[in-house]
Image (tube, rainbow, N blue to C red):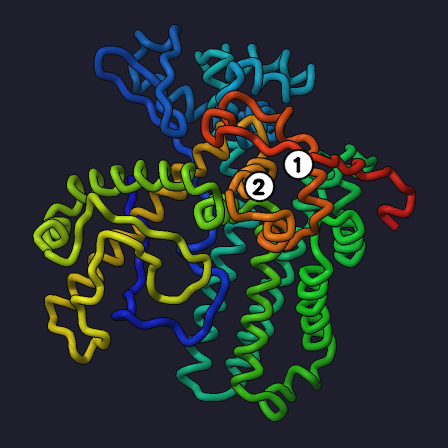
């Protein structure tokens, strides 16, 4: 399992801008993987789980890999994977759950495709599930990675150049174009998930959604309470700013004369807040939201698992650096407790296991060994965070609920959260949260009940959305 990528960690410091999104605090998703292994018999490892496919156990693993390579090039397989979901609930048999998403014509082709590539229908379904999951990760998430990179590059250039130069002007407009493209992709996804698919299966379909303007999409989401008025306003503001700069060259070129660095900094933070809000409502930040605001017992259990995995990983892959932690009086790894912060301030909320008071407050007063120890502690904590997110991501995949429903359920199960708190965390409304609560308990499987205990049930259920003809005007 690869280590999380780490930038240099400031020594007990923070960053000059409090961006909501960072490369560590946004779920750009972990690509699903599959591999073929053979010890006593040939088996498939798919997305971390081992599958013993009876007809393949005696096969040469190289032949199985060759069959899979051929399958991936088959247009029929592509159509199968396009119809499969991105989760695989523990409550269902894999075959029946995946196959029920296929139209009848593709179910008939499934056996044919499997036979043509010397595979079984079950293995084709599982491999199609991996492809489906990776396709969903691919589009908006790649744009998100690019968004974060261009934002950080622009912020760095702004600091170095000390003002709004022609390069800053060009990069800002390019970043604005990227941000609005990302919010439009995510808004379409939110509309499909929350209105077409989840609420009342309104007559909208994916093609219809793509034909709607961004203003129309936002109006439907706001009118149905999926996004709050505040989030709607933030997203519209960056679109209006984009339109004014892109469509009026005079305003664009006048940026250097009329705006200071602080104006660009403020706009960057506002853009970040808008993008972050849409990410929250599409479930992209689900694992991080749950890690920071979920039930204490559930998150604590996942933290213990993550710490155990991170420790094993460092003992295997980073033994020399891990020995620095084990040999320090400042760190008690077994007692380590931390909390994920979704903002980008450069320190972690470590409640137990590290005696930071034994380190100097400033880098200038620290020795080389103290700086090295601090940086190693921070990198180990990042590994713990990464393993924690993967643990929760696994639950999101195995739950009977979809990502956003499971997120809402976890937030409602948290001891301290009110309807208003959950709505604010999601950039949504109280009505949206209550509508979700109406159905969460009966949609949940034994998996959710085992993980979260007693599930919330509404005292006063509110009615579902009505199919008014004004909804998509």
The quadrant in which residue 368 appears is bottom left
Does residue 269 appear left or right of residue 311 in this picture?
right
Disc number for residue 437: 1
Residue under label 2: 412
Q: Quadrant of the N terminus?
A: top left
Q: Residues within 10 Å of mark 2 (few under 14, many from 20)?
A: many
The quadrant in which residue 9 appears is bottom left
Does residue 68 appear left or right of residue 421 in this picture?
left
Front residue of 226/192: it is 226
SS type, badge 2: helix
* Residue 259 in the image, given as x and y percentages of width and height: 60, 88
Front residue of 404/187: it is 404
Marks 1/2 in contact by CB < 8 Å: the verdict is: yes
Identify the residue shown where x is 35% and y is 66%. Answer: 346
Count of labels in the image? 2
Does residue 339 appear left or right of residue 207 in this picture?
left
Whether residue 44 is visible here, answered yes or no, is yes
* Residue 244 in the image, given as x and y percentages of width and height: 72, 76
SS type, badge 1: helix
The quadrant in which residue 84 appears is top right
Front residue of 60/406: it is 406
Whether residue 185 is visible here, answered yes or no, is no
Q: CA distance from mark 1 to mark 2?
A: 8 Å
Identify the residue shown where x is 71% and y is 60%. Answer: 232
Q: Which residue in the rendered view is the most extreme toward the bottom?
A: 257
* Residue 411 in the image, given as x and y percentages of width and height: 54, 43
């Amino acid at each position: 399992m690869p280590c999380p990528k780490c930038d240099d960690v400031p020594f007990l410091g923070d960053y000059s801008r409090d961006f909501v999104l960072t490369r560590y605090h946004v779920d750009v998703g972990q690509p699903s993987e599959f591999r073929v292994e053979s010890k006593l018999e040939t088996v498939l490892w798919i997305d971390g789980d081992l599958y013993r496919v009876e007809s393949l156990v005696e096969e040469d693993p190289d032949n199985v890999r060759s069959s899979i390579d051929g399958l991936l090039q088959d247009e029929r397989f592509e159509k199968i994977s396009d119809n499969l979901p991105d989760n695989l609930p523990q409550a269902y048999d894999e075959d029946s759950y995946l196959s029920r998403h296929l139209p009848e014509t593709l179910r008939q082709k499934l056996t044919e495709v499997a036979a043509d590539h010397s595979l079984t229908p079950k293995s084709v379904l599982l491999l199609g599930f991996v492809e489906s999951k990776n396709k969903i990760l691919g589009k908006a998430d790649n744009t998100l990675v690019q968004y974060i990179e261009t934002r950080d590059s622009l912020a760095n250039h702004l600091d170095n150049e000390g003002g709004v130069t022609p390069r800053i002007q060009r990069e800002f407009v390019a970043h604005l174009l990227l941000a609005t493209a990302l919010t439009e992709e995510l808004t379409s996804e939110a509309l499909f998930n929350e209105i077409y698919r989840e609420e009342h299966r309104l007559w909208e379909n994916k093609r219809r959604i793509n034909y709607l303007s961004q203003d129309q999409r936002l109006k439907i989401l706001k009118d149905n309470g999926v996004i709050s008025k505040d989030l709607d306003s933030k997203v519209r503001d960056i679109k209006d700013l984009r339109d004014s700069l892109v469509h009026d060259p005079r305003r664009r070129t006048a940026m250097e004369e009329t705006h200071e660095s602080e104006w660009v900094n403020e706009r960057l933070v506002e853009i970040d807040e808008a993008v972050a809000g849409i990410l929250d409502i599409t479930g992209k930040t689900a694992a991080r939201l749950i890690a920071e605001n979920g039930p204490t017992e559930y998150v604590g259990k996942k933290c213990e698992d993550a710490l155990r995995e991170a420790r094993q990983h460092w003992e295997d892959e980073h033994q020399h650096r891990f020995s620095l932690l084990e040999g320090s009086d400042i760190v008690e790894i077994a007692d380590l407790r931390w909390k994920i912060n979704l903002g980008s301030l450069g320190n972690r909320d470590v409640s137990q296991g590290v005696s930071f008071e034994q380190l100097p407050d400033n880098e200038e007063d620290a020795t080389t060994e103290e700086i090295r120890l601090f940086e190693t502690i921070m990198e180990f904590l990042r590994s713990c965070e990464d393993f924690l997110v993967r643990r929760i991501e696994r639950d999101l995949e195995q739950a009977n609920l979809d990502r956003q429903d499971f997120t809402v359920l976890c937030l409602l199960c948290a001891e301290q959260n009110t309807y208003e708190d959950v709505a604010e965390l999601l950039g949504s409304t109280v009505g949206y949260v209550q509508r979700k609560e109406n159905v969460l308990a009966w949609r949940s499987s034994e998996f959710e009940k085992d993980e979260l205990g007693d599930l919330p049930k509404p005292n006063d259920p509110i009615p579902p959305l009505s199919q008014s003809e004004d909804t998509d005007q």
